Image (cartoon, helix red, strand yellow):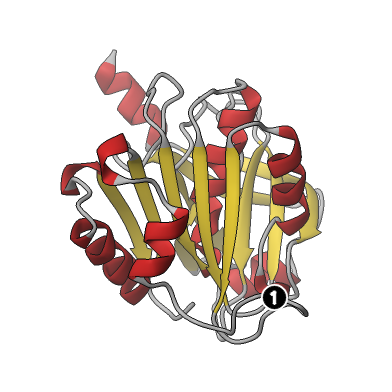
């Protein structure tokens, strides 16, 4: 049974774009119809493969933004990268009704499970919010009682993904708190100047280590390493700090 399940995750499936919406000027959420999808855990990702008419193939990995599901739809939020042969197609060209190949879900370590009772600290840099948003949505779907805190670092207010939804969830999902860090430009009347994540930020807006929180950190490599070091310095158990990183700057 385990071998069959692994084999299923490694199978390429054809998904169809059912809907798309812009999260920012350069990030687009794709809602994919995937009737034979086996389901996933929040925090997992998929491989996406494009095939050109001449047979050339390009493949990239993208975190899943939607809460767990079986039978689809599956949501991915893709950030357009300069000269990115896959991301530019998915953000600027990929049209409703068109197919794309997916393989997954992939990953079993950087995931949140609703049965885990511990409080949760989510720390995101830029597009690293995507798998953490899947966790927030999953908690909301099951009306989880685990308190969640999100610290979200972005360059400017215009670069924040899911801003409207996060505001609604803070209002409607008891136990969810969100704090933004703006590294280049803040909103008007914001009480702090632009800054990067620091010990003071995590100490003020995270959980005390003696609460035993599960910590999930996702973003650019430098951001993730800095945040993980801060958490350890504050006394958090390294075994409870899970990280996922990618290239670029936040």
Confirm whether residue 211 shows in the render: yes
Left or right: 42 as drawn, with respect to 170: left
Q: Residue at x 59, y 40 (%)?
A: 176
Name the quadrant containing residue 171: top right
The mark tally for this picture is 1
Percent position of residue 84, x then y: 54, 78
Q: Residue at x 40, y 33 (%)?
A: 9
Confirm whether residue 49 shows in the render: no
Q: Nearer the viewer, residue 97 or 29?
A: 29
Percent position of residue 93, x then y: 75, 69
Q: Nearer the viewer, residue 127 or 103?
A: 127
Left or right: 140 as drawn, with respect to 12: right
Is disc 1 surrounded by few (<14), some (14 to 19) or many (20+) residues within 10 Å? few
Q: Residue at x 42, y 46 (%)?
A: 121
Which residue is label 1 attached to? Answer: 190
Mark 1: secondary structure:
loop
Q: Is residue 22 above or below residue 44?
A: below
Percent position of residue 219, x then y: 42, 65
Q: Residue at x 72, y 58 (%)?
A: 163
Determine the residue located farthest toward the top in the rendered image.
1
Name the quadrant containing residue 209: top left
Left or right: 111 as drawn, with respect to 142: left
Left or right: 66 as drawn, with respect to 8: right
Percent position of residue 204, x then y: 44, 58
Q: Is residue 178 above or below residue 2?
A: below
Quadrant housing the N terminus: top left
Q: Is residue 27 above or below residue 163?
A: below
């Amino acid at each position: 049974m385990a071998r069959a399940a692994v084999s299923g995750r490694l199978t390429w499936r054809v998904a169809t774009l059912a809907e798309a919406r812009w999260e920012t000027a350069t990030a687009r959420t794709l809602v994919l119809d995937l009737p034979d999808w086996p389901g996933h855990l929040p925090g997992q990702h998929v491989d996406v493969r494009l095939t050109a008419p001449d047979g050339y193939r390009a493949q990239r990995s993208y975190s899943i933004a939607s809460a767990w599901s079986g039978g689809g739809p599956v949501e991915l939020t893709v950030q357009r990268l300069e000269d990115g042969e896959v991301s530019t197609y998915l953000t600027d060209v990929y049209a409703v009704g068109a197919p794309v190949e997916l393989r997954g879900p992939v990953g079993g370590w950087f995931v949140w499970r609703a049965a885990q009772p511990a409080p949760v600290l989510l720390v995101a840099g830029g597009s690293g919010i995507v798998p953490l948003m899947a966790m927030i949505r999953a908690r909301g779907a099951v009306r989880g009682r685990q308190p969640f805190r999100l610290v979200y670092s972005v360059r400017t207010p215009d670069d924040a993904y899911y801003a409207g939804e996060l505001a609604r969830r803070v209002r409607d999902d008891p136990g969810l708190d969100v704090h933004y860090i703006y590294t280049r430009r803040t909103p008007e009347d914001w009480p702090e100047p632009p800054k990067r994540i620091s010990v003071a930020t995590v100490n003020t807006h995270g959980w005390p280590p003696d609460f035993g929180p599960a910590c999930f950190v996702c973003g650019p490599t430098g951001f993730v390493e800095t945040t993980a070091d801060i958490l350890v310095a504050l006394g958090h158990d390294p075994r409870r700090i899970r990280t996922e990183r990618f290239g670029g700057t936040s």
